[in-house]
Image: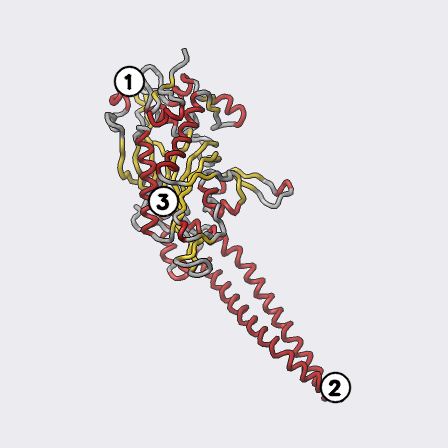
Amino acid sequence: MIDIKQLRENPARFKDGAARKGMEVQIDRLLRLDEEKRAALAQLESLRAEQKRIEKDLGPQMGKLNGELKKAEGEARALIEKQLADLKARPMALKEQAGDLEKIVARLEPEITSILLTIPQPPDGDVPVGTSSEDNIEVRRWAPQGFDIAAGFEKSRGFKPRTHQELVRDLKLADFARGVKMAGTRSYVLTGPGMLLHQAVLRYAMDFMVHKHGFQAMSVPVIVREECMVGTGFFPAGREQAYHCDEKARGETHDLYLTGTGEVGLMGLHQDEILDEASLPLKYVTVSTCFRREAGAAGKDTAGLYRIHQFDKVEQVVICKADEAESRQWHRQMIGYVEHLLQSLELPYRLLQCCTGDLGVKNADMVDIECWMPGRGEVVNGSPTGAFGETHSASRLYDFQCRRLNMRYRAGGDAGKGTTVFCHSLNNTVAASPRLLIPLLEMHQQPDGSVAIPAALRPYLNGMDRISPAK
């Protein structure tokens, strides 16, 4: 959520930010509603001050009039009785006026909040302007020694590559038919060494972040209340991508939603908390099952393990102080962790600077990491030419999520002292599987149809160095 005070002071910044992201927002209407609400609150404050003053003066005045009333007769008595009635009526009239103003505020607040939740974080000024992922800019690429991405797999390795679907079939690593039978399209069952490889990737990624980079391992719920989805910025804009559990229909007080990333749970941990500044930055990593409806993805990557409804992901989150330079430094570091992990797995990749139109609602900046997959791309002479496919996404959000989650720290002070400030947050995928199995299988395949296991993963596979076809 953006700071409405900043919006009042500089609406052009937020209008321009929304325009650069290609989003239509009702900023002018929000400002009008906000002005109306603030005027009502100012009147309400004035009325309440008057109420307090009247209540303070009312007792002595009524006491004096009641004393005079005992001695008064005729017209004088009637006049005093009227004065007493008028005094009693004044607080009631003010109370009614205050009630009317409270109704105005109560009517305005839901619409103000609803519009405020749709206003995107303005992109940073150094993010390239564009309309979609087609306008993203390659920053750099890496490949293991002896492999030339531009030349392709066959020229680099000397044989035509199999796709991951073919490798999965021949090595019996997954059962798509039974997965679809149980759960519908985009479902699968990892089997035998396929499941072991999947678990090895996840465990290696967790250990990599915990033991090499000092992140704290956490478990998080993958089924959460709506407030958690709103607080992390996945609602309202991404509601169509989430699986909804209609718990209210069963008599419960809250509906629940399946999360599409461990980021939701990691960020929700400290909702409505004031953190100790000395504890920052918080560096969390989790592995969780993720669920995505893939709404709008009809016909895209329908075969294989690339675009599926359920997967597991190791996710890193950093919660730091409200300092842009520190946020930018963490962004670079978190990307660097993933680069080192991919290099240790000998997987070619590239970094893409996302343009403004590809940032989404919540990000000030985002860098995607795409692994090169020999089985993707255009098919020429019966063989795919290879292409990059997204496997990671690193986001810098400043205080956007923390403001929605009401997550703060007390700047520079002892407990109970100092100003509370909204934290900054960042997140990045460490490893999402089984998607990461695609480049692993395709890049490490051998001419005989087997797949070599990268050295980094062998300790997690009881020393296994190769997956071979059954004889």
Q: Amino acid at mark 2?
A: Lys
Q: Which mark is residue 70?
A: 2
| Alpha-carbon span between mark 3 and mark 1 | 39 Å
The residue that disc 1 covers is 159
Secondary structure of residue under mark 3: helix
The residue that disc 3 covers is 357
Asked whether disc 3 touches disc 2, contact meaning CB atoms under 8 Å apart, the reply is: no
Give residue 54's position: percent from left, percent from top. 60, 76
**Disc 2 residue crowd, few under 14, some 14–19, many 20+, Cα 10 Å:** few
Give residue 323's position: percent from left, percent from top. 35, 53
Instruction: Give the image quarter of residue 462.
Output: top left
**Disc 1 residue crowd, few under 14, some 14–19, many 20+, Cα 10 Å:** few
Q: Which is closer to the viewer, label 3 or label 2?
A: 2
Asked whether disc 1 touches disc 2, contact meaning CB atoms under 8 Å apart, the reply is: no
Q: Which is closer to the viewer, label 1 or label 2?
A: 2
| Alpha-carbon span between mark 3 and mark 2 | 80 Å
Between 369 and 163, the one lying in front of the other is 369
